[in-house]
Amino acid sequence: MNKPINNLDTQNFSPYLIFSAAEWADFRADTPLTLTEEEVKRLRALNDPIALPEVEAIYLSLSRLLDTHVQAEQNLFAQRREFLNLNGNKTPFVIGVAGSVAVGKSTASRILRELLKRWPASPKVELITTDGFLKPNAQLEKEGLMERKGFPESYDRAKILDFLTKVKAGKQKIKAPLYSHFTYDILPEQYVEVDQPDILIFEGINVLQVSEMPEHGDSIPFVSDFFDFSIYIDAEVQDIEHWYLERFMQLRDTAFRDPAAYFHKFSLISDKEAREIARSIWENTNLKNLRQNILPTRQRADVILHKASNHHVNQVKLRKL
C-alpha cells in the first residue's frame, strides 16, 4: 500500500541540497583567503560577531561558487553573441541579497563584495542597497506610510526597476540615491554612481518579493527578474528579535547620543523605556513585515544561509540544478 504523502520524507522533495557549516567549508578547496582580520572588522555591521574563521568557512566557499556562475554566464554570453552575430559586452551579473532587518545582510554583502573583487572574472564589484530607494519621509508622511517604512509600498518601485533596467542594459554611470540612517531619510541630491561593474550586489529586505500577478498576463517585471543569483540570510524569528533589540540598545548609547540624530530622543529615556519602545517597533513594524513580506520569499533564493542564535551560519541550502 502506498504511503500517504504527509508521511513521506519531505527532504526527498526539497529543491535544495543542505549542508552543515563544516560540510560547506570543504568547498573552498585550496582557495586562498586574502582578507585580513582588520578588514573583516571594518566590514562587519554593529552587533555582528563575524570573524575571519567564518569568512573562510562560509563566505569564501560561497564566493568560489559565485565565481563559477559568473564565468558560466560570461561563456554563455560569448556563445550567444557569436550565434546571433551581436556586438557589445556582457552586462553585469546581479546578485540579490534578502532577509530581515538585523539579520546581517549588510555584513554578508560587504564581505562578498570584497571576496568577489579578488576573483579574476570579476575585478569590479559594486554594492547598492534598497534603502536609497525608500520614498522621502515627507512623502511617506503625506501617504500615511511612516509607520510602514520598510514595507514594499514605502519604496519607489519605479525607480528601482529603472535603475536595474539600466544596469542590465549595460548603461554607464547610473545614479542610485543615497540614504542616511543617521537622519533616517533620503539624502537630497546625493547619489552613488554605478559604472558597468562585472558584478552588482543588490541588497534589501524585500528584493525577492513578487507583486500581484496581472489579470491579463501583461508583463510586469519583478525586482528579482533582474537577478542572476539570489541569497537569503535566514534565522529563527526569536533570534532576529534579540539581535534587533540588542542593536537598538547599542545605538542608543552611541549614534543616538548625537543631538542631530533622528532617534536622539531615545537616548534621553531610561533603559527600560527604550527597550519597551524597541520591542514595540519590532512587533508592530519589523515582525509584521518579516512575516507578511520577507519570510515568504525565502524559498525563491538560490542560496539560504541560516544563522544560529550566536549569529554564525550553521547551515547552507543550495538550490539544486
Image: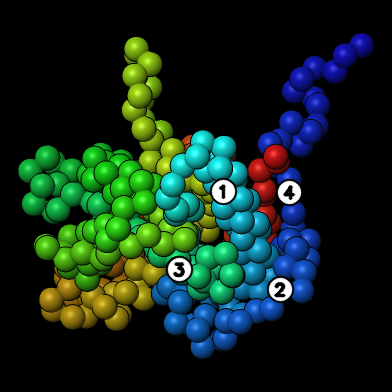
Foreground residue, 318 or 197? 197
- Which residue is under mark 3? 124
Q: Which mark is residue 18?
A: 4
Q: Nearer the viewer, mark 2 or mark 3?
A: 3
Mark closer to the observer (3, 1): 1
N-terminal-most mark, 2 or 1: 2
Q: Secondary structure at mark 1?
A: helix
Tag 4–tag 1 contact (CB < 8 Å): no
The three-letter amino acid code for the residue at tag 1 is: Ala
What is the spatial separation of the Cα atoms under label 3 and label 1, in whole angstroms? Answer: 19 Å
Name above or below for residue 312 compared with residue 155. Answer: below
Q: CA distance from mark 2 to mark 3?
A: 19 Å
Residue 31 has which mark? 2
Asked if one can make out residue 219 in the rendered structure from this viewpoint, the answer is: yes
Residue 199 x/y as whole percent? 47, 59
Crowdedness near tag 4: few (<14), some (14–19) or many (≥20) residues, C-alpha within 10 Å: some
Looking at the rendering, which quadrant does residue 302 occupy? top right
User: Which element carries disc 4, helix, strand or loop?
Assistant: strand
